[in-house]
Image (cartoon, rainbow, N blue to C red):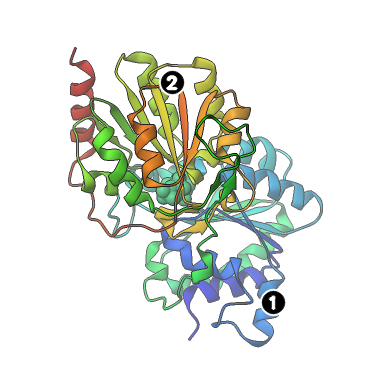
Amino acid sequence: MPNPEEELISELRRGGVDLVCTLPCDRVKRLISILSYPKKSSTFRGPRQTDISQLLHIPLTREEEGVGICAGAALAGKRTAIVLQNSGIGNMINALLSLTYFYRLPLALFISHRGIYKEKIAAQIPMGKKLPGILKGAGISYSLIESRADLKNIGKKLTSVYRKNSIHAFLLSPAVWEDSTCSVKPSMVSSPPAFCSDRPAKAGHKEVRKLKPVLTRYEMLEIIAPYLDDAVVVSNLGVPSKELFHIKHRPSNFYMLGSMGMATPIGLGIALSSDKKIIVIDGDGSLLMNPGSLATAAYCSPENLTILAIDNGAYGSTGNQPTLTGKCVDLELVARGFGMQNTCKVAGKRELSSIMKKKDIGPRFIHCIALPGNRDVPNIPLSRLEIKRQVQGFLTIR
Ligand SMILES: Cc1ncc(C[n+]2csc(CCOP(=O)(O)OP(=O)(O)O)c2C)c(N)n1
């Protein structure tokens, strides 16, 4: 019996899908692994392998981008689909209505429907529960795929979506994947970023600094923790927040439990409203989702803001799918291009602690080149309101 991921991909082929864009959710990491590496998948043999390799897979930096790519491809006659987490609907609703719907272009959405079944992350619940209402309000039809038995109807439905030029969402319950034995290919882990700086060397630095990752995110957080002093720390969602809590909880740590892409904007908002020192611990996937926030930070230029971009070349929290920093993007150059002037790149323990010791004027952008990988740490035992109250309490102390 095929795995549910294989069954879904067969249905995509049955519906004639040519192009699939994806942005990871933990629950669909095995599906994305197969879409990314069809030929290497040992679970696919014979004609199905050829079938699947005909599907063009495009990894996204933001779900909204997928709406544009799919609209362009649909104009050129392709049948398109996006695999996303329900949170991503919030990132694409305007483009869905003012582009796909407006021009009557067809699009299939495969939404990993979090927050409704055995959910451990409380921040997933509001969006997950409200999703059907949001889709209804937007006039987007949907089918509930509650178990793997429901997968078999998808191919037929897709044919009518493309024929009628409509948008249709398939809401995939986590229950669908429960008995899957598919594995995530080790090749999904990206080659971590390694950069050569071509800027003039500063005194004491070598002419050309080759930076190879040597530390994981957890090891970097361990180095950073003793220097957080009296700073408010905004910590990126998912594993980074859990790791930071595990290393050293401080009431002035704002642990994000959702809202990917918002770490730097939250830090900027605090920095503009408080005299305290603010340190944002952001991630490469999250910064790529919302890079414009660096331009706003550069423009507003709060001296008390430091952004630590822990760049492990991967969406670590959802299974280490590669991001483009492992391929072609240098986030420090992005920050500089967007107007951040005080930037640097670090990888090793000594460099990282010496940069943390410095009392430089911000806004600072510290590009930390890290190895992919997550430490197996427990969930944060604080409720969202406890997190909020602790940080608010700290911010109001004079
Ligand atoms: C809008 C949205 N899309 C997708 C997700 C799923 N998701 C949660 S954490 C994460 C990866 C974040 O990657 P990165 O910022 O590089 O941090 P890392 O985990 O690697 O430290 C993703 C894709 C989400 N929460 N929200």
Residue 308, quarter of picture: top left
> Which amino acid is tagged 2?
Gly
Q: Position of residue 283 (x, y in %)?
A: 45, 43
Q: Which residue is mark 2?
A: 362
Which residue is nearer to you in this view: 30 or 375? 375
Q: Nearer the viewer, mark 2 or mark 1?
A: 2
Is ligand 1 within 8 Å of the beta carbon of the residue shown at mark 2? no
Which structural element holds mark 1?
A: helix
Q: Is residue 352 left or right of residue 16?
A: left
State the residue at coordinates (43%, 20%).
Answer: 362
Earlier residue among tags 2 and 1: 1
Q: Position of residue 58 (x, y in %)?
A: 65, 56
Q: Which residue is mark 1?
A: 51
**Disc 2/disc 1 C-alpha distance (Å):** 53 Å
Q: Is residue 201 left or right of residue 223?
A: right
Q: Position of residue 36 (x, y in %)?
A: 60, 66
Which residue is nearer to you in this view: 24 or 356? 356
Q: Which disc is residue 90 wearing?
A: none
Look at the image and tell me in which quarter the C terminus lies. top left
Q: Is residue 125 left or right of residue 384?
A: right
State the residue at coordinates (43%, 16%).
Answer: 302
> Which amino acid is tagged 1?
Asp
Q: Vertical placement of 57 versus 131: above or below?
A: below
* Visible residue check, residue 113: no
Q: Vertical placement of 284 versus 156: above or below?
A: above
Q: Position of residue 310 (x, y in %)?
A: 43, 43
